[in-house]
Image (cartoon, rainbow, N blue to C red):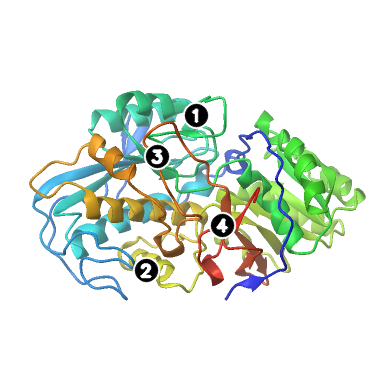
Amino acid sequence: MSHTIGRTRLATAAICALALVAAACGSEKKSTTTGGTTPATTGPATSAPTTAGATTPGTAAPGTTPGTTPGTTAGAAGPAKGTPIKLALIYSETGRSAPAYNSVDTVAAAWTKWINADMGGINGHSVEVMALDGLSTGEGAAAAANKAIAAGVVGVVIQDSTAENAISDTLTKAGIPVIGGSANGRPQDTGDTHWPNTYFNVAPSNPATAASTLLATAAAGKKKYAAAVCAEVPTCADAGKLYGSVAPTLGLEYVGLVTVGASDPSYTAPCLELIGKGAEVINLGLAPQTAISIIDECNLQGYTGAFSSANNSVTAKAFEGIKGLNLIGGLNGFPWWADAPPAKQFRDVVDKYGDGTDTRDPSATSTWAALELFHKAMGAKGPASDKPVTAADVIGVYHGISGETLDGLLPTKITYVADGFQPVITCFWMFEMKDGKFSTLTSGESGNGASGDLQTTCFGK
């Protein structure tokens, strides 16, 4: 059940987009193999194609009938006889961003197996997903993008906070659409905050994502807001401009920030500084392991307030075991704990076809939402099995998507346009974690029309 807090006054001032990416800091690496396969090294990037090709249909996921997902009419179950649909997932398997993204290949592999085995593909086409490691660097992401283009993919999901700005021009010039992902950065300098018309976001982007912790602070009834942000990325500290601008519009006092490095020998001084400022909420613009170190040290120094975090930095495995932790914030992927049937189906499929990797994080759920939007849209209007699916087909189908929410798996009613720039998404899922249990915070009108655990809150409305 959701935890409803009274309506908060949302900011209406126009604020420049900030490329604040908490997940880009730190150096923790993944310790388990995901996706059901071991990536084969191919130069600077690696690929691990998920299950592909025609398969014998099995049993539909619990709560569905073969060939359908809740709210969809995509494809009838049966042997996939058409040419395969090739997609790519460019993500941080290794490098500093890996802890925030290393569940997404498991989700993509599980979804692919489910689509091919239980759903008969999409309109009779089997699906292949190449999982490509962007190495948490622009160079690695560029190499992965070039590999995806050479392989003939018709769409790309990006889950790498360093990748979007590095590869958007490459994909756009190649005519390959981006069909979802983390949406942390601006894909190109458009002079505004909008996305190119072949960039089909399913997640909120800045400034809404950076402001989500402020909105959660107001919804939780706190007043004094401070932040600890990564020292490794200069733009992390720029978040202070946004915090200082938005806080007063919500009745909050922004008392400042400190920068913290993952390799710092001690966190005593920054914690004492934040405590001295009277912070009631300390936002953690940090990778999970660094954030945990700050939490431990600040509590040791006598801090009794709450902490906040947002988006890809929020993982259940990182925070749920910290005794007494009160964590609030915003997610750019739907809550993995939701009771609603579409969220339950996500868990059922990952349980059935996953490799045991913990997928309780918004990177995992936003990957699922992106793939399910592809499933529904292409199943309804994509080419039949006797015709190959091209990138141009995908772009054409996506330009016809209007008012889609995937029954609450998307943060707002998604409508894409054929001309100009795609609109930014300003809605997200607010949450609170107490005693190791996550719940949804709600405030004001639902941004996606859902109620309960899947209800979203919007920035600037």
Disc 3 marks a residue whose amino acid type is: Val
Q: Would you name the residue on which mark 1 appears?
A: 165
Dot 3 or dot 2: first in sequence order is: 2
Residue sitting at x 37%, y 54%: 106
Residue sitting at x 20%, y 44%: 85
| Pointer 3 with pointer 1, Cβ within 8 A | no
144 versus 124 height, above or below: above
CA neighbours of label 2 inside 10 A, class few (<14), some (14 to 19), many (20+) = some
Can residue 153 be seen? no
CA neighbours of label 4 inside 10 A, class few (<14), some (14 to 19), many (20+) = many
Residue 417 - label:
3
Disc 2 and disc 4: Cα gap in Å?
A: 20 Å
Dot 2 or dot 4: first in sequence order is: 4
Q: Position of residue 163 (x, y in %)?
A: 47, 33
Q: Would you name the residue on which mark 4 appears?
A: 315
Disc 2 marks a residue whose amino acid type is: Gln
The nearer-to-camera label among 2 and 4 is 2
* Closest to the observer, 237 or 351: 237
Provide the secondary structure element on which disc 2 rests.
Answer: helix
Disc 4 marks a residue whose amino acid type is: Thr
